[in-house]
Structures are given as structure tokens and as C-alpha cells.
Amino acid sequence: MKKAFRKFGGCILALCTAIGGTACAQDDGIVVYGDNNENKKQISLAWWGNDARVAYTMDGVSVFEEQNPDINVKCRYGVWAGYPKRQNIYMLSHDEPDVMQINYDWIKTYSPDGMGFYDMNKLTDYIDLSNFTESDLSYGTVEGRLNAIPIALNTHCVFINKDIYDKYGIDIPKSWDDYFEAAKVMREDGVYPISMGDKQMFFFVLAHFEQSTGRSACNENGELILTKDDIKELLEFYKRLHKEKVLMPIQTSDFASFANGVSAATMRWISGSQTMFDGLFNEHVNIVPAPFPTINGSMDDTERLEWYVKPATLYAISSKTEHQKEAAKLVNFLLNDPEMALLQNTEKGIPISKTARETLEKEGKLNNIDYVASEQMFNYGDKLKIMQPILEKEDVFLSFFNGAAYYIYDEKSLDETAEDIYNKMYKINK
């Protein structure tokens, strides 16, 4: 029945009540679907994502229910737009699903003391934690309580259109200076060495700042500690990128500019990169991950890369669930089951779970660009920094992006712009 729902979508919504035994509704863009069977333990699962994610997750739930005939799973899912608001309503009303896909920053938002989600350390009879290292589990641990388990790790990566760089006889950039040197050649033809969105730009200039100064944007408590002088340095480097035509103006930058060759590189999250570049691969465009840029052009000789890594997404269990065992079985299935691993493949990133990863490797699935880029992340993991959730807050990076425009286009002085950005950032920080 779940497969039928997946295939016929909206038509099934209209037929649900007529079929009987099926709960099916839409609430602010969130689809709720599942059988109401009083003879089974009822648990709920929530996630967000595109149609492909809905399809393989629904198929996975069907497999789980076949393996566990005493459990019925009611599904709640929707696209990302509006989903955080819905999650907030769930949590505030204590109506959150038994099992839920969560964002990394939601741990701090909903469980600052570790009590907001169920402690999965108590469920090791049902969740095989041996598939994860202590470092893996530390991302979801608060005050010694295992609130969430990461599905995959994620970081930003620069993806190069090697065909364009080869055309100009330029090697793949390794240092910050390499990008400026590339711009000297490419800008004559109106081509930019790199393009990216506002959030990626913030992390790009932040990496340069932290490498060149040795200072950090946040303290150990995850609070912003950027000074006005620090913000000035960020602004000056950003303006240089803009002025020397290294970075395509953010306002006109989109994926099409990379796909059409107006920019020779783009900065994106590793997770989902294969899907994003599929169309270009079909046209035989040679896209490769670039090294994390450093001051001296070597990742090996640098103590810290100042590049941030975080869980792509995580699974958590509601602290209010009445079915801890059943919820734990579902979490274990979603993370560790070989059938689920093959259904999900690398759509959520390269899985951390040892069993899931070995399954994909055995089936020859770990040969795409997600995997190649992830290998770089894993190989240099000790040089990467754990993402502080505040840096991902939209108001924080947009404070920089929107404020910087006044300086970039000479409408305000450096001091005035830094002052404005500082005040907005620290209002958020409080």
C-alpha cells in the first residue's frame, strides 16, 4: 500500500478514507500516512526531502514492517520549505514523531541539556552502536546522553569544472592565491574561477580568515567571538575576491552559471553532489573535487584547515515516546540495515554506519563524486573543525552578506559596515 501511495501521490490522498484502514492527510505541506491497526504497536517517523527521498524511505518502511510484523509505522514527510516551522510546532506541543530526521543545530535548540530527545545509550539492545566511533556519536551527545546518531558527515567542497581549467592551462587551485591567479587569465573572457551562494561565501571567507589569523569565529561554547576588526578582515578579503573577479557576484550566481561555464567552479555541500551534477556528467563534463584551499597550497603541511564539518542529518527518538523498543528498532534499521542502505544509497551522503558503508562498497556503489569528495573529508578529518550551529543560522550569515554589499559597492565605509554587521550578529548571538 505504501508503494501505491508513493506512485500515485495526490490521488491516494483523495481515496484514503474510502479504502479504509489507512490514515492519510496533508497539514501545512506535511503528508501524514500510515495504517491504523490496533493489533500492532504504532510508531511514527518524520523526515523531509525530495520525491526520491520519499520514495526510498517509504520502500524502506515497507521492508521494516515486513521484518517486524508487530509494528506499524505512520509516516510524516514534506519538503524542506516550512519544515523547520512544523518541527518547532511538534516540539513545543509535545507532539513530535517517535523517530525523526533532524538537523544538527536542532540538538542545541531543542535539547541544550540533553533531555529534549531520548537517550539512545539506554537502547543498545536494539541499536547496534558498534557501527559508529566515539567521535561519530559525539556529534549527537549532550551531557553524556546520546540524543541523535548522524547518518553521514558533510562539509562544503569546491567542485571544479576541470575542462575549463584545462582549457586555460591552469592547474586545479590548491591555495587562495591560485584562485586569484586563475582570475587574471579567465576574466578576459568573462569567466569566473568560482561561484557560490551567500552561505557558502560566508564559510569561504571565514576559512581564509581563520587560516591567515589563527583566530576562531566561535568559542568552545559555540558563541560568536568575532570582533569588529575581525569582521573588517572578512570584508576586505570578500571585496578583494569581488574586485579581482575571482568570485562571481553572489546576486547573479546560481547553478546555471556553473552549468553554462560562466564560472569554472562552485562550492557546495558534499552530500547530494552526485545528484546535482548528474546532468553535467551525462554531457561528459569533467567535474572533480578540489583540495581545501590553504595559505601555502598544502593540506598536509597545515595544522588546521579551518574548514567546518557537521552531520548531514541525524536520527533522534522522541523523549516522549511510549514505544522506546520499537522506535529503537526503526532507528537501527534506517542506519544499519543492508536493505535500507541499498535503497538509500548515498542520497543522504556516504553513510557513517560501518555495516551500511560496507554494503554499498560490496555492491560497487561507492564510486561517485560524493564518495570521492567524502574521502578527502575523512582523510583530513583531524584537521577539520566541528560546525558550530550558530554559524549556520540564516540571520548570521545573511547579516554578513547583506551588510557587506554596502562596502562592496562603496556605499559605506569599512568601519561603518563592520559596525552594522557586528551589531546585527551579536543581537542574534544573544
Image (spheres, rainbow, N blue to C red):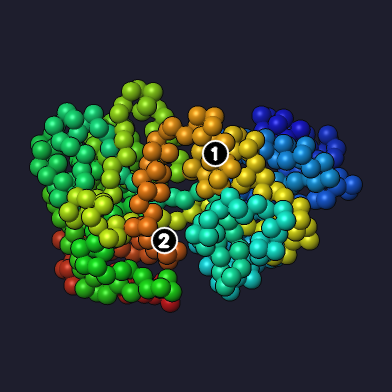
Residue denoted by label 2: 387
Residue 384 image-quadrant placement: bottom left
Q: Residues within 10 Å of mark 2 (few under 14, many from 20)?
A: many
Which residue of the protein is positioned furthest toward the bottom in this rendering?
A: 430
Residue pointed to by mark 1: 358
Q: Mark 1 packing: few (<14 Cα in 10 Å), some, or many (20+)? A: some
- Please name the residue shown 37% across and 61% down the image: 385
- Left or right placement of residue 396 versus residue 237 in this view: right
Q: Position of residue 123 (x, y in %)?
A: 70, 59
The residue furthest right is 39
Q: Amino acid at mark 1?
A: Glu
Instruction: Return the x and y of residue 315 as percentages of the image width and height.
Output: 60, 54
Residue 416 x, y percent position in the rendering: 21, 72
Q: Nearer the viewer, residue 177 or 97?
A: 177
Q: Is residue 243 left or right of residue 317?
A: left
Which of the two discs, 2 and 1, labels the residue nearer the N terminus? 1
Res. 283 image quadrant = top left
Residue 222 falls left or right of residue 285: right
Q: Is residue 338 visible?
A: yes
Q: Relative to the observer, which residue lies in front, 285 or 187? A: 285
Residue at disc 1, secondary structure: helix
Image vertical order of residue 300 relative to residue 211, above or below: above
Q: Quadrant of the N terminus?
A: top right
Q: Quadrant of the C terminus?
A: bottom left
Amino acid at the residue labelled 2: Met
**Residue plotted at (31% across, 26% down):** 285
- Mark 2 or 1: in front is 1
Residue furthest to the front in view is: 130
Find numbered disc 2 in the image and state the secondary structure of the residue it sits on.
Answer: loop
The residue positioned 36% from the left and 70% from the top of the image is 218
Q: Are marks 2 and 1 in contact (CB under 8 Å)?
A: no
